[in-house]
Image: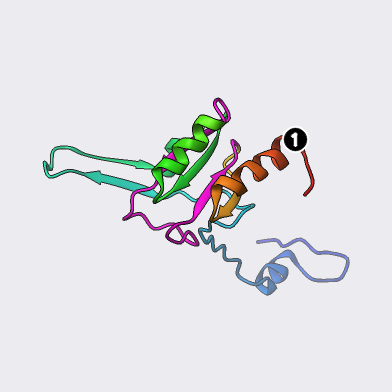
C-alpha cells in the first residue's frame, strides 16, 4: 500500500485518521425560512379497508402558496377565495404533529416548499406576507 505525501510531511492516511467523524442531524421544523418537513398523514375510517396515507407535500405545487392549519376551516377557505390562483388552503388533521406548530397557528408555504410565515391572525398577517413576497414590499 502506498500513501500520498503532502508538502507538510503528513500522508493522506494520517490526515484521514485525524479528521473528526462527521455526523448529519436533520431536525424537522416549521420555522419560517425552512423547508416544509415531510410529515406522513394517515386517514382511517371505521371500515379498515378504507385507509390511505399521504404527506403534507402532496398538497404543494409549484404555482400556489398553501395555507395549512389544524383549525379554522372557514378562515382558510375565505383567504383562498380572496386570492384565487395564488393561495390554496389545506387542513392538517388534528392527530398530525408538526414541530413548532401550536394549536390555532397557521402556516403559509411558498411554491418552492419553504415556509413563508407561521403564526396567528391569518386574516391580517397572510395578506401582508403575500404582498411582501409577491410585490417585494418592505414593511
In the shown orientation, is residue 34 left or right of residue 68?
A: right
In the shown orientation, is residue 95 left or right of residue 9?
A: left
Q: Position of residue 33 (x, y in %)?
A: 64, 52
Q: Label 1 crowding class (10 Å Cα cut-off): few <14, some 14-19, many 20+?
A: few
Q: Nearer the viewer, residue 48 or 19?
A: 48
Q: Is residue 136 visible?
A: yes
Q: Position of residue 7 (x, y in %)?
A: 88, 66
Q: Position of residue 133 (x, y in %)?
A: 70, 40
Q: Nearer the viewer, residue 108 or 1?
A: 108
* Dominant SS in magenta: loop
Image: magenta residue range:
83-111
Q: Residue at x 52, y 49 (%)?
A: 107
Q: Is residue 57 visible?
A: no
Disc 1 marks which residue? 135
Q: Secondary structure at mark 1?
A: helix
Q: Residue at x 69, y 74 (%)?
A: 18
Amino acid at each position: 500500500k502506498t500513501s500520498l505525501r503532502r508538502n507538510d510531511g503528513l500522508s493522506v492516511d494520517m490526515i484521514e485518521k485525524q479528521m473528526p467523524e462527521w455526523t448529519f442531524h436533520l431536525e424537522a421544523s416549521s420555522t419560517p425560512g425552512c423547508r416544509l418537513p415531510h410529515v406522513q398523514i394517515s386517514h382511517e375510517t371505521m371500515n379498515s379497508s378504507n385507509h390511505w396515507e399521504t404527506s403534507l407535500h402532496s398538497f404543494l405545487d409549484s404555482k400556489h402558496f398553501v395555507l395549512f392549519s389544524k383549525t379554522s376551516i372557514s378562515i382558510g377557505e375565505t383567504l383562498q377565495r380572496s386570492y384565487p390562483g395564488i393561495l390554496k388552503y389545506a387542513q392538517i388533521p388534528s392527530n398530525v404533529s408538526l414541530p413548532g406548530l401550536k394549536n390555532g397557528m397557521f402556516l403559509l408555504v411558498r411554491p418552492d416548499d419553504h415556509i413563508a410565515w407561521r403564526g396567528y391572525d391569518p386574516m391580517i398577517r397572510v395578506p401582508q406576507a403575500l404582498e411582501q413576497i409577491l410585490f417585494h414590499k418592505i414593511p
